[in-house]
Amino acid sequence: MKSYKTVYAYGEGELNINKSRFIGYATPVESEEDAVSFIEKIRKKHWNATHNVPVYIIGEDMTLQRYSDDGEPSGTAGVPVLEMLKKEGITNICVVMTRYFGGVKLGTGGLVRAYTQTAKAALEAAGVVEKSVYTVMDCEMDYHFHGKIRNHLMDRPEIIVGETVYTDKVIATLYLPPDILDAFKNDLVEWTSDQVTIVIHEDIYLTTKGGKVYNG
């Protein structure tokens, strides 16, 4: 499992450039079927548009990459958007840029800028986030250790505190980067004089932004 960047949800943005109307659409996808379905939906919605330029990248390692210039001069529409997404490290995404030609030709450089700006407007609306891998850890301890551990965690922003259950003991769920697991377990043992029960669950993906769990 690897961490990667994608978009949080569907989003769209619109620009008017030299009388042409550009509309960008972005959505998260998990498969090529998802991407093709989204592209067809936009093409059907804008059946009378001059161009509907699709781009999608799928896979943690960006193994599947597809694009089309949809009638624009070669390399001026789909390619620059694909390269922008790759440079930003964004995957599991489908973007479609719709253009209604306004009568003024933009030239090669102008088209590249217009389609890239349109895609970026869609990305901003969709919200770029990280899918980060975290190890899930349950820590069971006596109450008098809980405050001490909580204070230590205030200096550990890389660790996300999840649900805390209060019964005869305190059970706190923590999410931490896998590479610090062993060291943190040792810390817990030291802080509690080895009076903590630790249960490790399978690693999961959390949607994060700036190191915090992202809820839109």
Image: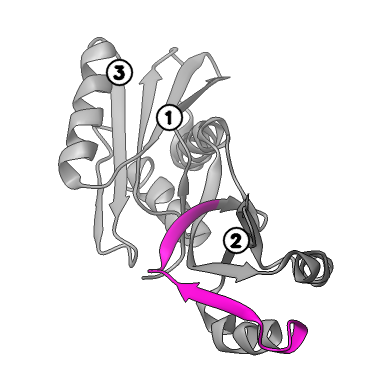
Sort mark 2 into few (<14), some (14-19) or many (20+) by Cα contacts within 10 Å: many
The amino acid on which the numbered mark 3 sits, given as a three-letter code, is: Thr
Q: Nearer the viewer, residue 90 or 163?
A: 163
Q: Which residue is mark 2?
A: 171
Please tell me whether residue 155 is drawn above or below residue 171 in the rendered image. below
Residue marked by disc 1: 10
- Dot 1, crowdedness within 10 Å: few (<14), some or many (≥20)? some
Above or below, 215 relative to 86: above
In the rendered image, the quadrant that contains the N terminus is: bottom left
Q: Quadrant of residue 102?
A: top left
Q: Amino acid at mark 1?
A: Tyr
Between the C-alphas of marks 3 and 1, the distance is 23 Å
Verify CB contact (< 8 Å) between mark 2 and mark 3: no
- Read off the residue under disc 3: 50
Q: Which residues are magenta?
A: 190-207
Above or below, comparing residue 168 to residue 95 in the picture: below
Front-lying residue, 144 or 56: 144
